[in-house]
Image (spheres, grey):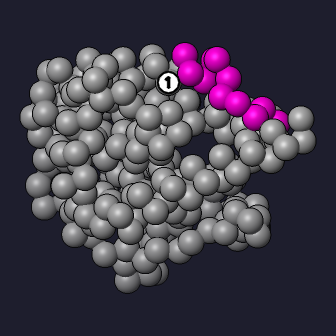
């Protein structure tokens, strides 16, 4: 058994960054194990035993129990290790709204990145597809609506939903920038989160820029071949 939890991650991954930042916010000391995708470590026998879906992040608790999916991990970490329940409320009404925003991140916002990766890294497309742009605008519209109801995505208190949404959004903001005039609430929230999240540049922006460079590098390569 490990003396502290282990988090398998890659910094370019928004979900992995959400787990790292959540751990830092609650003061949880985790052992970070980087997974090198360029060496296909996510397809190794050792890693596949942890997660047959070969995705990061993966969280291994001190008792050896393995947890996958960033949303499940951050909720578990706060529930077990958090000193308070602010980030993931025990109150069922607030928790339901937090869960809803987590589903929005997974089913709406993150799908924009998945669509871009499929088209612009693996699909050979040199420009952003109209469908990607439509998905992105829809995601931004919805997030602006959430933020009209409070300073954070659920009311006026920070939650795990803010962390999850933010790690994805800052990556998208580098690729398809949020129009601050059209979406003023998102712009204000991004600034607010920058002040609140620990190691913002070293963890969050560094990882977001790595994914941005990968996507834009592939697009440039596709364009040169067309």
Q: Residue at x 38, y 68 (%)?
A: 202
Find the residue positioned furthest to the front: 224
Q: Which element is circle 1 on?
A: helix
- The residue that appears at 46% across and 19% down in the rendered structure is 137
- Give the camera-side residue of 136 and 99: 136
Q: Is residue 126 magenta?
A: yes
64, above or below 136, in the image: below
Q: Position of residue 179 (x, y in %)?
A: 36, 27
Report x, y in % for residue 99: 31, 31
Closer to the camera, 68 or 172?
172
Left or right of 76, for residue 92: left
User: Could you say which quadrant of the image residue 88 lies in?
Assistant: top left
Q: Is residue 59 above or below residue 112?
A: below
Looking at the rendered structure, the number of numbered marks drawn on it comes to: 1
Q: Which residues are drawn in magenta?
A: 124-134
Residues 128 and 64: in front is: 128
Instruction: Give the residue at x 17% y 20%.
Output: 148
Residue at (9% x, 34% y) in the render:
156
Q: Is residue 5 left or right of residue 147?
A: right
User: Taking 20 as reference, is 144 above or below it?
Assistant: above
The magenta stretch spans residue 200: no
The answer to whether residue 92 is visible is: no
Can residue 198 be seen in the rendering of this structure? Answer: yes
Q: Residues within 10 Å of mark 1 (few under 14, many from 20)?
A: many
In this picture, residue 214 sits left or right of residue 141: right
Quadrant in which the C terminus appears: top right
Q: Which residue is mark 1?
A: 136
Along the line of sight, the residue nearer the viewer: 19 or 198: 198
Q: Position of residue 109 (x, y in %)?
A: 46, 30
Residue 175 screen position, x and y as percent = 53, 39
Q: Residue furthest right?
A: 225
């Amino acid at each position: 058994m490990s003396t502290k939890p282990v988090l398998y991650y890659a910094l370019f991954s928004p979900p992995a960054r959400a787990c790292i930042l959540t751990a830092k916010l609650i003061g949880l000391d985790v052992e970070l194990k980087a997974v090198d995708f360029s060496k296909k470590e996510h397809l190794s026998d050792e890693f596949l035993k942890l997660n047959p879906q070969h995705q990061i992040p993966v969280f291994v608790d001190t008792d050896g129990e393995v947890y996958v999916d960033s949303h499940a991990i951050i909720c578990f970490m706060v529930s077990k290790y958090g000193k308070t329940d602010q980030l993931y409320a025990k109150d069922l009404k607030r928790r339901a709204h937090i869960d809803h925003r987590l589903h929005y991140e997974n089913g709406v916002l993150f799908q924009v990145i998945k669509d871009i990766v499929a088209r612009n890294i693996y699909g050979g497309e040199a420009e952003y597809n109209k469908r990607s742009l439509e998905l992105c605008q829809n995601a931004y519209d919805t997030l602006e609506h959430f933020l009209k109801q409070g300073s954070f995505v659920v009311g006026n208190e920070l939650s795990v939903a803010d962390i999850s949404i933010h790690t994805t959004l800052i990556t998208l903001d580098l690729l398809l920038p949020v129009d601050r005039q059209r979406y003023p609430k998102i712009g204000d929230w991004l600034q607010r989160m920058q002040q609140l999240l620990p190691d913002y540049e070293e963890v969050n922006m560094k990882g977001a820029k790595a994914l941005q460079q990968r996507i834009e590098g592939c697009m440039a390569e596709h364009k040169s071949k067309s």
